[in-house]
Image (spheres, coloured by chain):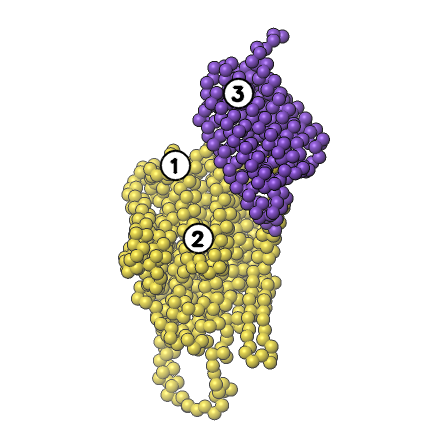
Amino acid sequence: MTALPYHLQIVNLLAALLLLISFAMLSQRRVIGLVTLFAWQGAALALSTAIVAWSTGQHHLYYSAAMTLGLKVIAMPWYFYRLVKKLDVNRVVEPMINIPTTMLIGIVLVIFAFNLALPISEMSGTVTRSTLGIAMACVLLAFLMMITRTKAIPQVIGFLSMENGLFFAATSATYGMPLVVELGVALDVLVGVFVLGIFIFQIRETFDSLDLKHMEKLKEK
Amino acid sequence: MSHLASLDAHVLDLAWAGVLYWLGLGFSALLLHRRHGLLTRLVFPLGALGALFMAGIGVAGLLQPASSMVLPIGLPDLPFHLRLDALSAFFMVLLGGAAFGITVYACGYFRNMAAGPLALLALWYHLFLAGMVTVLLADDAYAFMVAWEVMALSSYFLVTTDHKIPEIRRAGFLYLLIAHIGAVALLLTFGVLQGGHGDYTFNTMRLAEMTPFWSSAAFLLALFGFGAKAGLVPIHVWLPEAHPAAPSPVSALMSGVMLKTTIYGLLRITFDLLKIQLGWWGTLALALGLVTALYGVIFAAVQSDMKRLLAWSSIENIGVIIAAFGLTLIFHTDGKGALAALTLTALLYHALNHAFFKGLLFVGTGSVLHATGERRMGHLGGLMRYMPWTAWLTLIGALAIAGLPPLNGFVSEWLLLQAFLLTPGLTQPYLNMVIPVAAATVALASALAAYVMVKFYGVIFLGQPRDPGLQHAHEASWPERLGMLWLAGACILLGLFPTLVIQRLEPVVLMLTGQRLPGISNWLLLTPVSAERASYAPLIFLAGVTAVVALTYLWVRRVYHGRVRRSEPWDCGYPEQDARMQDSAEGFGQPIRQIFEVFMRVERETPDPFDRHPHYRGDSRDKLWLLIYQPIADLTAWLSMQAARLQHGRIQWYLVYSFVTLIVLLVFTR
């Protein structure tokens, strides 16, 4: 088996890092820690996108990388830090399912994702196709995180992390989506975060807590 | 025959022009939504002229061979096909004739309505008329269903004209629901009828070869679909709710005309589109029709709301017509062509009669409603003195529907009973045994219908006013009187000249059964089968009745009055008579309620003997509602509750739903 070029090895390494960070996020109990991990995930994503852009000559991927860096590594984590400080919610929160169980489910999901990605990556002609399984695993793990957390901010971070996974999947399968689409998605995410931020304030105003359990009261009797 | 089909398509062109005229009139009414005077003085009279035009087209169509045309409207590759043959033409005469009188009446009836709602009503009214005509003209399933839906939806909006009243909204919803369940059945009927060709024109359906199984499936679906619209028991519950809820001219159109489009549809599908007919279909339709007739008339007898009473009476008449339809099928499949022709003639005649007398009675109640603001018969009475025009004209309708000679209701019921009496020639012995019972049921329903009409007319127009306010009741306006005159005139003429009508019906009967009536009739004497069996001469009968009445009148005036002795010692035990001593609507229907209590759920509030202000309330409700509809409604509510369990209110669970869906889809799509 021939050795991969160094830059692709670096991409693979970053992909592995991404998956690792996803698992770390699953097990992280503190909100601040979660935000930090989210920023690191964004950084790994931005770096890997930039390397793919350099190795394949797809120039629009540079813009994507820059956007990821600006939005997901700097702007949003900063916003979340402020939010957490302002709302004073940086406490240890127990997820609904205990962490070892969550990790086991996560492993099952990773195996499932790899199994799923196998036929697709065989069809794909990109140099980064081997990372597709990781990208899908990231999406599923982020989803799992959203399910297991009961507080509002971790859920928003889970949502954003899922978006990271999708972005990575797009990069590895087809060298990213067209720039227009990516711009649109970025804008959506930005607006989404703001809307969710407003919601978080509102939920706190209404229930005096950010625990989403209280929203059960809204159910129609 | 092909050279005949290519002859004059221009009658059909004119019919289509009439439809467009109505549509244009409806939409121009919207533009006139501030001009009240123009709406009542221009739009409705022009609409009435359109109806007269349609009736003329129908008469012309009866005299001509069938013609067809293809319209350039519709979906791409699915143009509308229209066809005018004897069957459509007959129903166009019915529609145009009844709609003319009703629309003339409407010019006066709606004069007090605000201009805005009136413009909307004019739109739906003319769309309704146009939809009904297009149903009759449609020659492919697509055009038929579009027209059918236009008819259903516009009539829904007409029913909910007074949508601020919750009961009316509820009635409208029930109507819409059952109409659409029926429409789904019709859609499936056409799906079966096209027989896998993918071509939905009626011409292809006529040629399709079908097994008895699929033919039966199509027939049963059609019977259900049209039955739902016709008010066949047990899918009749919407009718006594929706028909009275509409403004009276609309009730008249719905009961008189719209119900007939279902009869048209049944005849079209069974005798024209289906190649084979089976005998048991006839037995089924006969049984359902008889049950409907009896059920309808029993409930009509116990009603105390005048429009609801008429709506139940419509159910009875539809039942009689469907029973005639079943009998036609039985004769037709048994090879008794002449008898099938006789029964079909009776059916068509009764449909035509019902359009006129039911229309007349409904608009009559409309005038009463306008004059008194009261629909409950317990608060009416003695109106003959204050509204003589309405009273006398309604009397003609009441006598006609009661089946008294020499009016039109008698002719059709007599023809139908003649057909029943001739059944012993049937080849199936069990039918021979059952059919006398069926004939007795029809006779019973007719007799009870007369009873219902005595109640209807007697309580509303005769006796003394049950409410002091009734003395201020005003007579109907001139357009209303003219409309009623037209309908009453039609009832009289259809009763006096039955042979002329039956001759006009011949093309329809010939087209559907391939037979003519065997009897030879002249303009004076109606002889359906042969002179030895039975014949009827309405003019001579009328002369006899007139002579007897005149002689009695003279005798009372000249001979009896001369010897009268005036004295009031004790006044035969009636020293003071007031309105409360008269028979009430509930009281009159009480024997029927006692006899047929099994079908009803009776709710009564009887007053205490020591009550200072005694109050009595009696309400007889349809038991079928509890037995059939309530369980279905409960089941639906229960299923919805089960589905509502998905709603936990916890965002985690919702996320799990999407997560599981995502995983499942990923597994399936790989």
The hue of chain A in the figure is purple
Camera-near label (3 vs 2) is: 3
Question: In which chain is the residue bearing label 1?
Answer: B
Closer to us: B242 or B92: B242
Report the residue marked by disc 3.
A49
Vertical arrangement, residue B62 with respect to residue B194, above or below: below
Residue at position x 37%, y 81% from top? B555
Camera-near label (1 vs 3) is: 3
Report the residue marked by disc 1.
B75
The hue of chain B in the figure is yellow
Regarding mark 1 in the picture, which secondary structure is present there?
strand
Closer to us: B91 or B544: B91
Q: Where's residue B494, x and y in %?
A: 36, 60
Q: Is residue A89 left or right of residue B101?
A: right
Residue at position x 44%, y 69% from top? B374
- Amino acid, disc 1: Leu
The quadrant of the picture occupied by the N terminus of chain B is top left
Q: Are marks 3 and 2 on the same chain?
A: no
The quadrant of the picture occupied by the C terminus of chain B is top right
